[in-house]
Image (tube, rainbow, N blue to C red):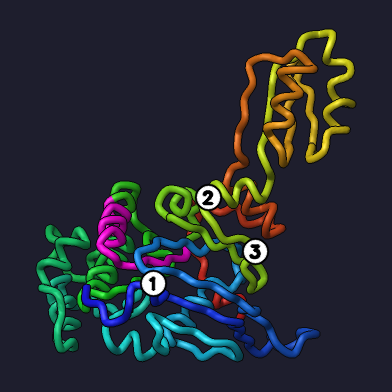
Amino acid sequence: MTTSTTATTPAIELRGLAKTFPAVRGSHDSEVRAVDAVDLRIQPGEIVAFLGPNGAGKTTTLDLVLGLTEPTSGTVEVFGRRPREAVVSGAVSAVLQTGGLLRDLTVRETVRMIASTYAAHSPVDVVIDRAGLTALADRRVSKCSGGEQQRLRFALALLPDPRLLVLDEPTAGMDVTARRDFWDTMHADASAGRTVVFATHYLEEADAFADRIVLIAGGRIVADGTTAEIRSRAGGRTVSATLPDHALARATAVLRSTEGVRTVDERGARVVVTASDSDAVARLLLGELGGRDLEIVTAGLEQAFMALTGDDRDRLGDQPAHHDEELVR
């Protein structure tokens, strides 16, 4: 990967970014605000996941980063340049969910054809190997599964040796092994300085493979941080302990009067408390209330997602990918 800007230049910088579309006919609103005043900075070498419910604005934001659409207001810079300039220079590649493949060509023929459009590119066999397609190189695209076609799109994205990879549902259709191999490659690339930004509907994927999660709802960033930080912000921690019989009668009243406690649940001799200050609750349970078998658990990412986005319909998991552009346009 070549570098032409300083190490301090952000890979992506969004300032006051907004994008509106005309509202659907019959709507009371004149426009839909798909992206609403987003500020975001992503540094070189980061692996960042965009999470959010359907229609949150994830794909629209990525389209703006790729220069596929222009912002209504605000600015987008990719390595200090306008998005289209960065794309044309080969600094940015994308793996999208659909399009760009000719069914009658083989995998190798497809990669060779796209490689011919670049003045300089990585060796064809190298990118085929990195995408895990060597055994399928002579197979026609029409005979490839959805996951295999997605890996072919990944191979094409690697041809210009980009400094930034933008991925929209990159592992859609891949089996578990292919997903793991794909992310092993992404981490190796990030260690070498490549930046990876991806939108996903797989909570486990974001949790396992991203260094940072940007949670989007209603076109705005509602949380930005590591998985642990987002879990903590959303629901605090759950603290539980087994209490002696003589302490159970007054435990609920004592705990509910403690600052930062949100819920108290008695489950036989065990008390389960959700609180923003888990240390204070732990001291109270072990000290004044004489508890034992203490456990402290951080909220799950799915709980955090629902708490921060207010969405209890779209339980992100191993579901078919949705393209949120269909909902906002």
| Dot 1 or dot 2, earlier in sequence | 1
Three-letter code for the amino acid on which mark 1 is drawn = Val
x and y percent of residue 312 in the render? 69, 53
Answer yes or no: do the residues labelled 3 and 1 have beta carbons within 8 Å?
Answer: no
Q: Is 216 included in the stretch rendered in magenta?
A: no
Q: Residue flagged by tag 3: what amino acid is it?
A: Val
Mark 3 vs mark 1, foreground winner is 3
User: Residue 44's x, y, as percent?
Assistant: 36, 68
How many angstroms separate mark 3 from mark 1 (CA)? 21 Å
Crowd class of label 2 (few under 14; some 14 to 19; many from 20; radius 10 Å): many
Residue corresponding to mark 1: 166
Of residues 64 and 156, which is closer to you in this image? 64
Q: Quadrant of residue 48?
A: bottom left
Residue type of the residue flagged with mark 2: Thr
Q: Which residue is mark 3?
A: 222
Tell me where residue 182 appears, x and y as whole percent.
29, 56
- The disc placed on residue 227 is 2
Q: Earlier in the sequence, mark 3 or mark 1?
A: 1
Residue occupying image coordinates x 49% and y 84%: 76
Q: Which residues are magenta?
A: 181-199
State the CA–CA distance, disc 3 to disc 2. 14 Å
